[in-house]
């Protein structure tokens, strides 16, 4: 019984950590610390579905290519970061930003492109990780606390206290 509760507590903790890592990946806090290289308007040309499990976490999202006209005057076709653009964006102009990151995460050879309203966030990224860890930790402690409480009640019954 003790090892089952321990295993269950470990599973709850692991689920919380995975949940936190998924949020951490989605909000890309390291990208949120870099300056915006350019702003522009995107027109979606093609999208593919990704997921439900990948190196970016759990869930299904869209990875879309778009023709982008930048404020600097450049025009190019780029792949936005997963989940930033969707097929429903076809036919409309979507405000986007390009972060001047050193590493390229989307395989396009260019710094990542984000929808302006979904820009990376240090606060949300780190908050997701800490929240997932906290939820998992509290869940694990609740399971272990319940086990300890049951053991104490069983000992009291054996000794005739109840």
Image: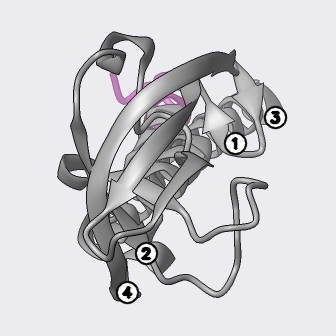
Q: CA distance from mark 1 to mark 3?
A: 10 Å
Residue 65 falls inside the magenta stretch: no
Return the residue at label 1. 10
Q: Residues within 10 Å of mark 1 (few under 14, many from 20)?
A: some
Return the residue at label 4. 33
Q: CA distance from mark 4 to mark 2?
A: 9 Å
Return the residue at label 3. 3
**Mark 3 against mark 2, which lies toward the viewer?**
2
| Residue 86 can be seen in this image | yes
As drawn, the residue found furthest toward the top would be 88
Q: In screen coordinates, is 42 left or right of 99?
A: left
Q: Kindly state the secondary structure of the residue where label 1 is placed.
A: helix
Q: In screen coordinates, is 77 left or right of 114?
A: right
Q: Quadrant of the C terminus?
A: top left
Residue 1, image x, y percentages: 76, 23
**Mark 4 against mark 2, which lies toward the viewer?**
2
Q: CA distance from mark 1 to mark 2?
A: 38 Å
Q: Earlier in the sequence, mark 1 or mark 3?
A: 3
């Amino acid at each position: 019984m003790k090892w089952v509760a321990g295993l269950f507590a470990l599973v709850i903790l692991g689920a919380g950590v995975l949940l936190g890592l998924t949020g951490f990946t989605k909000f890309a806090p390291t990208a949120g610390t870099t300056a915006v290289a350019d702003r522009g308007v995107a027109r979606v040309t093609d999208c593919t579905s990704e997921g439900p499990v990948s190196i970016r976490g759990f869930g299904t999202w869209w990875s879309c290519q778009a023709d982008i006209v930048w404020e600097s005057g450049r025009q190019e076709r780029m792949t936005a970061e997963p989940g930033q653009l969707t097929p429903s964006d076809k036919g409309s102009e979507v405000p986007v930003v390009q972060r001047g990151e050193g590493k390229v995460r989307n395989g396009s050879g260019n710094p990542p492109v984000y929808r302006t309203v979904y820009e990376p966030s240090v606060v949300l990224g780190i908050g997701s990780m800490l929240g997932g860890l906290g939820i998992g930790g509290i869940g694990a402690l609740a399971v272990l606390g319940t086990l300890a409480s049951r053991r104490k009640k069983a000992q009291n019954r054996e000794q005739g206290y109840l």
